[in-house]
Structures are given as C-alpha cells and as structure tokens.
Image: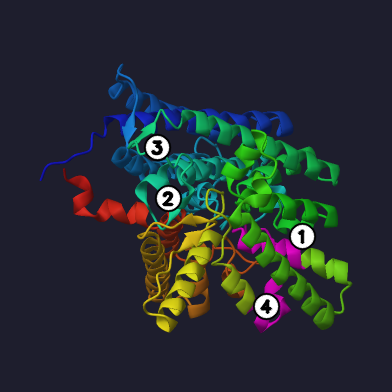
Amino acid sequence: MTFSIDIRPIVFVIGLLLVGIATFMMIPAIVEAVMVDTTPTEFLFAAATTGFFGFLLILANRDDRAFSLDTKQAFLLTASCWIILPVFAALPLLGMGLNEEAGLSFTDAVFETVSGITTTGSTVMTGLDDMLPGILLWRSLLNWIGGVGIVVMAIILLPFLRIGGMQLFRAESSDKSEKVVPKSAELVKWITSVYLGLTFLCALAYYMTGMSGFDAINHAMSTLATGGYSTHDASFGHFGAGSQWIGSVFMLAGAFPFIAFIKFAQGRPRALIDDPQIQAFIKFLAVVIFFSALMLQADRGWDFFDALRIAAFNIISIVTTTGFASTDYTTWGTGAVAGFFILTFMGGCAGSTSGAIKIYRFQVLWITLREQLIRLNSPNRVVVMRYHGARMAPDLPISVLAFLAAFFASIAIFTLLLAMMDIDFVTALSASATAITNVGPGFGDIIGPSGNFSALPDGAKWLLCLAMLLGRLEVFTLLMLFDPQFWRE
C-alpha cells in the first residue's frame, strides 16, 4: 500500500495550534490572578506543557517552502485537530500543579473540553457559582474557539469534500482549485472579524441588561458559539428577562450563515434578508414559538408575553444547538418533551456555529420529495430541481440522504452501546442524540436540563466524546479516516 498524504505540514499546523492554545491559557490565568489574587498554577503548568509540545512539533516539521494544503491534508488536519486539541485543553481542568487535591479526573476533564470545543455544552461540573473564575473563563473560551473553528471548517473545507450537500454554500463557486490554503486566508480574516464583532456586541448587550462584566463576556462567547456553557448552575435561570431576550437574538445570530454576515459587512444590506436558509429558519421558529407560547399560556396560566419569552429562549436554544436553559422544560408535559426531542435534530444554517442536521438539508429533502411526487404523477415529465433559483447538482439529494442515513445510524449505534452499559433507554437515546447533534442537555432525571453527565460511567463518557466529535465533524469527516482508500494513492 502506498500512502499518499504528506503529514509533515499537518503536524506543523497542529504544533502551531498547540502554541495558540497555550497562549489562550494565559488569558484565564491572568484573569484568575487579578480577580482572586492567587497564583493560577494549573494554567501556568498546562500552558508550559502544551507550549513545549507545540514547539517540538513546529521545530521537527518546519519547512521554508510556501505553505499549502491539498484537500486530503486539510481533511485529515481538521479531524486531527478536534481529536488532539481537547486533550491538551483538558490539562487546566485536571488541576495539575496545584498543591491540594483539585480538578477533575482525566475522563471528566477530556469530556468537558471535547464538549466545550465541539460547542456541545454537556457538562460534568457542578458548583459553578463558587468555581474559580479562570476555570469558568476557560470553558467559555473553549466554546468560543470551537465556534470559530467550526465556521471556518464549514465554509472553507466541507464544500470541497462534498459532504452532505455542503457544496451548495461554497464561498467561491467558480473556484475549482483543490488548494485550501492560502487562497482562503482572506475569508478566514473576514470570518474572525465578524465573529469578534458579534461577540463584542453580545457582551455589551448582556452588560446593559444587568449582567456583571465577567458574566457578560463568558456568556457572549458561549452564545455566539452556540456552545451553552454558563458561569452558573442555573444557567440563564440566574438572569432576568432582558438577558434572555438578548440571548435569543444572539443565539440566532450564531446559527445564521456567517457568509451572509460577511456580505452584509461588505455593503450588501439585503444579504441577511435574501438568504433562503435564514428565511426558512425564521419562519419555522416563528410558528413553533408562537404556538408553544399559546399552549403555555393555556396550560400554565402565564401571561402571554412571559410565555412567549420563555418559549422563545428555550426553543431557540435547542434548535440552534446552544443548550442554555432558563427553566426545566421537561416539566411542561409529555408533549413538550416529545417536541423538544424532535427540535434537537433541527439545527441552524450551514456555515454557522450550530450543529445537528441544519435547515438547508430539510429544504433539499423537501425539494427532492416534491420532485418524486411529481414524477409519480407524471412519469414522462422533466423536472429540474432548483434551490433558491439555482439548479441543484444531480448528486446533491444523494449526498444529503447519505448524510442522514449515517447520522441516524450513528445515533442508533451509540444508543445501543450506552444501553449495554446498563443505562436506561431514555438516558441512552437522549445522550446519543444530544451528543451527535451537539445540543448539550438531554432528557430524563440524570442528564436533563436540571442534571448533568457526571453520574454516567467513564466508558459512557468516552463513547459520548466520540459521538460529539462525530456530530461536530459532520459524521463523514471522521468516518473517512477509517476508509483504507483515503490513505492510498
């Protein structure tokens, strides 16, 4: 067998990213030193260790030639980064370097960082209200870093790989090059600038609604990343109505395609209005939220605007795969639980920070279903399938159906594996679904909105780490690593 991939540039980039992670670790270290007047030993130790390994990889794989990655290399790099970086990011959570016994077990620490960097938001940590500010900020930073990484991957890499229809949203449809870097460098700059700007606006809006500066910054990062990590055990139940409305708006922003924001920033004000994904997404949410508010008003006797706010916040949180909660919606009745479980699979728009299936795949499915019905009624009729006026590629419906088949098969397999660990069916099913969709909270007494994942056995946590990575990498990105053909010439 002849291996066709030169891994040296991949290892070099991983080294650069490890140095970057080590640098980011100094931010919570400084904040903790200032806020609680203590030496943040766990972060200093973790930053030194991570930076050391990063520099070793850089020095061992340095090349003075112009830097470039082909599609296979970018594909392998993406999967490798999401596997390797969470392990080093877990070091501060282990409490390494502390004199007292502190920190999480290795399994729990990796679970927390995989959940954070994949923007899932599932947690094994409790007592957040009394936790060191450095640890809280590090969790939010992981959400934020993972969010921008997801956008870059979705907009630049996945369209080249033609995974599940992502080629619809290729930023430069006329560019048939197989080179991913450096042609995409300018787009990365735009993505980062828009992401930073939205995060700043969100933090400012949170602060104006009464959040402390620390809470505002943390929640802004996890909101735009649709990650769901909070600084309080009660999540958004700790804050007032104003913060919940702001959260709803910016969770939507995180679930919108960032290409639309870039076009808007470049002077095309109708980009956010004319996008077919955004149009369908907003219409769907408006209908679901309105009728949910009516049901809450009738069943619970709440004021309509209170019911509207609570329904909007929690539904948007689940659909955008953020995972914040302002209340335990599983107490709203069996119908509400079933509804929220279905909403878990929806997701936001392609090219956003949200996970799950995403709205455009449902649009493609509807177009395919409509075309099939027309053919059944008129077998000789020529039907051209179009998306937003553009003719769809013939392989697009097949790629979307293949993605959905792999997606739901993965949930079934992980549910079975968890159930074999003597985990009850509701917990096993909802844990698998929430991990692969990157939503965060599950259902049931253990991992519901009022619980967390700490009670699960270690084996289950490692399985869910794999499920979170699988879902975050759009299933095929990780599965392709197990295909022998991928490694051959």
Secondary structure of the residue carrying numbered label 3: loop
If you read the primary sequence from the N terminus, does the residue marked by circle 3 or circle 2 appear first? 2
Q: Is residue 260 above or below residue 423?
A: above
Q: Mark 3 points at which residue?
A: 175
Q: Residues within 10 Å of mark 4 (few under 14, many from 20)?
A: some
Label whose residue precedes the other's in the sequence (3 or 1) = 3
For label 1, the residue is 237
Quarter containing the C terminus: top left
Q: Name the residue under label 2.
A: 167
Closer to the camera in the image, 195 or 465: 195
Q: Measure how far apart labels 3 and 1 are at the Cα level.
A: 47 Å
C-beta proximity under 8 Å, tags 3 and 1: no
* Residue contact between numbered discs 4 and 1, judged by CB atoms under 8 Å: no
Residue 98 horizontal/vertical position (percent): 54, 37
Magenta part of the chain: 311-337
Q: Which residue is identified by label 4?
A: 336
Relative image position of residue 355 (x, y in whole percent): 53, 56
Q: Nearer the viewer, residue 150 or 388?
A: 388
Label 2 crowd (10 A; few <14 / some 14-19 / many >=20): many
